[in-house]
Amino acid sequence: MMEFLNAIGPWVVGVAVFGVPVALAWWLSDGFSSVEVGSAETLVVPAFNPHTQRAGHAVVSKPTGAPVAYID
């Protein structure tokens, strides 16, 4: 059993050090451009809030494409 653990130890460390951060970066790299929130009828997308004049995110209705709420 110890031989097996010694054999896979470097692989476990390699995956923890390199694999997990790469997988996390790949997963988050879309900028949350299509995260479904609440229902299948809305999306959270990057948007410019005209009320505060700042960039942020907006909850957008899929059928109409109109912003439902702004998230700063």
Image: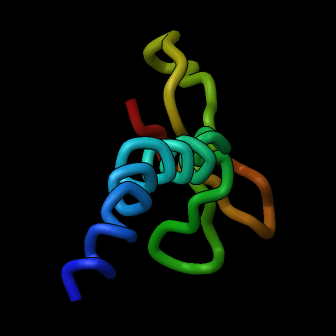
- Give left or right: position of 23 versus 16: right
- Residue 72 picture location, percent across and down: 38, 29
**Colour convention of the picture:** rainbow
Of 49 and 9, which appears nearest the observer? 9
Q: Residue at x 51, y 10 (%)?
A: 53
Of 16 and 30, which appears nearest the observer? 16
The quarter of the rendered structure image containing the N terminus is: bottom left
- Residue 48 picture location, percent across and down: 61, 23
Residue at the far left: name it: 2
- Residue 43 picture location, percent across and down: 62, 59
Residue at the far right: name it: 64
Quarter location, residue 7: bottom left
Quarter location, residue 5: bottom left
Q: Residue at x 50, y 27 (%)?
A: 56
Quarter location, residue 62: bottom right
Q: Is residue 57 above or below residue 43?
A: above
Residue at the far top: name it: 53
Q: How many marks?
A: 0
Q: Is residue 49 above or below residue 52?
A: below
- Give left or right: position of 36 versus 52: right
Residue at the far front: name it: 3
- Give left or right: position of 52 versus 6: right
Q: Residue at x 66, y 56 (%)?
A: 34
Of 48 and 21, which appears nearest the observer? 21
Q: Residue at x 55, y 44 (%)?
A: 22
- Residue 55 picture location, percent across and down: 54, 19
